[in-house]
Amino acid sequence: MSTELQELLDSNKTWAAETESRQPGFFTRLLKQQSPQYLWIGCADSRVPANELVNLLPGELFVHRNVANVVVHSDLNCLSVMQFAVDSLKVKHIIVVGHSNCGGVKAALLDARTGLVDNWLRHVQDVRNHHAEWLDSLAPEQRVNALCELNVLEQARNACQTTVVQDAWARGQEIVVHGWVYGLHNGLLEDLRITVAAPEQLSQAFQRALSSVKQRYQAARLSSTT
Ligand code: CO
């Protein structure tokens, strides 16, 4: 086994040279400042690389990733990222991004025992338990992706309810929270349309997005059984 990871270091050299030749001065400009418009909160899954999916360059997307794109009010890591992004970088958008067939969501759904991460995934199990009756009404093969989408809505709502976002809205700072889901099978991002730009929009935006997710899965369920 290689202990040097030379391939990665070599390909980094090539990438840096190509980037610089396409846009001379690229790195020295970034050295002076970063001014991303977006904070991406996504899953740690290696198949969901934030910048690549939306074709953004270094400096254009501030990123926080964890298993199953969870936003918890006691997670200092995520909250610190959010605070820096909102208060210092002044991002205009926070996008919570889940993805289909998420291993973390699947483990949470099925009560799989994996290790330490089970404790983290308790937050996704809260989402599952909250919507258990509806999830049970779906075909078993629909449930993982349905929970992936419910989880995006719940975590986007959590993001809206953090002190960071609440305080930003209270002082009149423009910030919009979104919830998206990425299809591993087709490479496409879908907007789940929980789009919240002010605290008073949250409840209605959440309910509307939730109804639309539920309708879509119920329609798929009916068309597969008829
Ligand atoms: Co995942």
Image (cartoon, grey):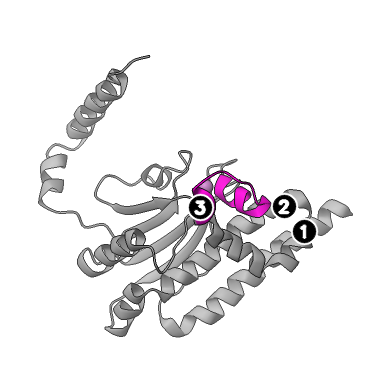
Q: Is mark 3 within 8 Å of ligand 1?
A: yes
Mark 3 and mark 1 in contact (Cβ < 8 Å)?
A: no
Q: Using the numbered discs, state the Cα–Cα distance from disc 2 to disc 1 in whole angstroms.
A: 6 Å
* Structural crowding at the residue carrying mark 3, measured as other residues with C-alpha within 10 Å and reported as few (<14), some (14–19) or many (≥20): many
SS class, disc 3: loop
User: Which mark sits nearer the N-terminus, 3 or 2?
Assistant: 3
Res 23 label: none
Q: Using the numbered discs, state the Cα–Cα distance from disc 1 to disc 3 in whole angstroms.
A: 21 Å
- At 76% from the left edge and 56% from the top edge, which residue is drawn? 220
Q: Which residue is mark 2?
A: 142
Would you say the magenta stretch is mainly helix, strand or loop?
helix
Q: Which residue is mark 3?
A: 68
SS class, disc 2: helix
Q: Is mark 1 within 8 Å of ligand 1?
A: no
- At 49% from the left edge and 65% from the top edge, which residue is drawn? 155
Across and down, in percent, residue 129 comes to 66, 66
Q: Amino acid at mark 3?
A: Ala
Mark 2 and mark 3 in contact (Cβ < 8 Å)?
A: no
In this orientation, which residue lies closer to the viewer: 103 or 111? Answer: 111
Q: Does residue 108 sit above or below 198 in this rendering?
A: above
* Structural crowding at the residue carrying mark 1, measured as other residues with C-alpha within 10 Å and reported as few (<14), some (14–19) or many (≥20): some
User: Which mark sits nearer the N-terminus, 1 or 3?
Assistant: 3
* Structural crowding at the residue carrying mark 2, measured as other residues with C-alpha within 10 Å and reported as few (<14), some (14–19) or many (≥20): some
Q: Which residue is mark 1?
A: 138
Task: Report the span colored magenta.
Answer: 103-119
SS class, disc 1: loop
Q: Using the numbered discs, state the Cα–Cα distance from disc 3 to disc 2 in whole angstroms.
A: 18 Å
Q: Does residue 59 sit above or below 178 in this rendering?
A: above
Query: Nearer the viewer's eye, disc 1 or disc 3?
Result: 3
User: Which of the image's four quarters has the C terminus?
Assistant: bottom right
Mark 1 and mark 2 in contact (Cβ < 8 Å)?
A: yes
Q: Quadrant of residue 20?
A: top left
